[in-house]
Image (spheres, helix red, strand yellow):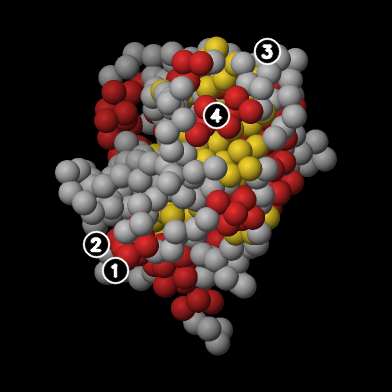
Amino acid sequence: MSFDRGRHTLHISAKLFAENRKRLATALRGKAPAHSVVVLAGGIEKNRYNTDAEDLPFRQESYFFWAFGVHEGDCYGAIDVDTGKSILFPPKLAPDYAIWLGKIEPESWFKNKYEVDEVHFHTGNSITESIQKLGAESVLLLRAYNEDSSNWLEPPTFPGIEKFKTDTKLLYPEFAELRVIKTDAELEVLRYATKIATDAHKEVMRKIEPEMYEYQMESLFRHISYYTGGCRHLAYTCIAATGENGAILHYGHANAPNAKLIRDGDMCLFDMGPEYNCYASDVTCSFPCNGKFSDKQKIVYNAVLAATNAVFEAAKPGVRWTDMHILAERVILTHLKKDGLLTGEIDEMVEKRLGAVFMPHGLGHFIGLDVHDVGGYLGDAIPRSQYPGLKSLRTTRTLKERMCITIEPGCYFIDTLLDRALVDENLKPFINAEALKAYRGIGGVRIEDDVVIWEKGNENMSHTLPRTTEEIESFMHKARNPGA
């Protein structure tokens, strides 16, 4: 069977996940003890605080989804390392479930839908008994650390687990590394999710007008993503920042909830991305709400666009991502110097970390089943830096083919950082304080593309967006003047 949201959306075969399970078993052979079985637990549906109301539609835990593609909650799964055989354990539902939540499907329905070898409802010792029949002596459990949140995904447990030797160290690095390198089937889904993101961003650019509210743009983006693309979930909280709010890097949360009235002349920084079948997109567009760049907006935008293009061309297999971050800083600083905001030697600015004043976040991150996907500090990653800007990098690895990564340089005028820099003896000699005054309150610019790394030349999955100032102005003009 396959997943889709209708004839107009992407059809995804369950073979995508069968291939993933095969990759995992292959990667573990020779490293895991003989007669080892991987046991994974899926996510559990949760209610809002102490009520019986669901907070959001259920979304599966990403590691479990990578291996089984299962959308239902409270499931377990097992993979025999030696043979690759797979078993799915959905929950045994009470008869009254059918009254409130729909038909109770038999085991055969799950077997057909998800193309696993066996299905058994998990009750009592059913998991233990099933994997004992596989000859399991060791059980590999996933205990996964997340470098971005500093949280742990704790290993599952089940009745009878004490009958086996358990290992919680081997699985995580192998599993996470497989998620970093995308298959053809995964790339197809990521391309689709990114296409829907770009379509929704373009619709926002068509419809935006001064005197609208930021949340209306978020609402339109959500609507287009779901209505035309079948994307029920967004990959993260929408950032629909305008004017000075563009200088708040993670705008859109409860303390800054996309609530501002959009004023004529405001620069927009819209960072929004849906996910499809749990695969994420992450795209940022910056443009003037009235469709016409001011001179200052154009200066900042072109600096960021030049950095985007430079990194896209330079980011090859074997290149360390840290160097790409420095390249982006260097390009932005060069443009700011050319336009009179900075003075001095660019190499010195980079060394003294002036770039982090204008781009305090990391250049980009892996993307896949999580918007900030796993594996950023595995492989040949170097330790996280303690220096401004560099310490925010979500990966320091060298690039490989089939990595999916965002390229998202930005330039912001953040009062807190500017004020610190102007009293810092190492930084203030580079800054033209008088020229800088005119940029305070302008907000910021970020351009973010979802990119696949290839030896032959990188693939920009968000390539259909207007990106130059001329393209943006022309696109928005035509949207407002269809006959022009």
x%, y% of residue 452? 68, 42
Observer-nearest residue: 151 or 396? 151
- The earlier-in-sequence mark between 3 and 4 is 3
Observer-nearest residue: 110 or 18? 110
- Which numbered circle lies on residue 477? none
Marks 1 and 2 in Cβ contact (< 8 Å): yes
Observer-nearest residue: 456 or 228? 228
x%, y% of residue 472? 54, 63
x%, y% of residue 195? 60, 59
Find the distance from the CA under tag 1 to the CA under tag 4.
Answer: 60 Å
Residue ID for mark 2: 261
Q: Disc 3 marks which amino acid?
A: Pro
Query: Are there few (<14), some (14-19), or many (20+) residues within 10 Å of tag 2?
Result: some
Find the distance from the CA under tag 1 to the CA under tag 2.
Answer: 6 Å
Residue ID for mark 3: 33
Find the distance from the CA under tag 1 to the CA under tag 3.
Answer: 61 Å
Query: In the image, which is nearer the foreground, mark 3 or mark 2?
Result: 3
- The earlier-in-sequence mark between 1 and 2 is 1
- Which numbered circle lies on residue 129? 4
**Residue furthest out toward the bottom:** 483
Question: Which quadrant, please, contains the N terminus?
Answer: bottom right
Residue ID for mark 1: 212
Q: Disc 4 marks which amino acid?
A: Glu
Q: Is residue 419 left or right of residue 119?
A: left
Q: Residue at x 55, y 87 (%)?
A: 483
Q: Disc 2 marks which amino acid?
A: Leu
Question: Which quadrant, please, contains the C terminus?
Answer: bottom right
Q: How many marks?
A: 4
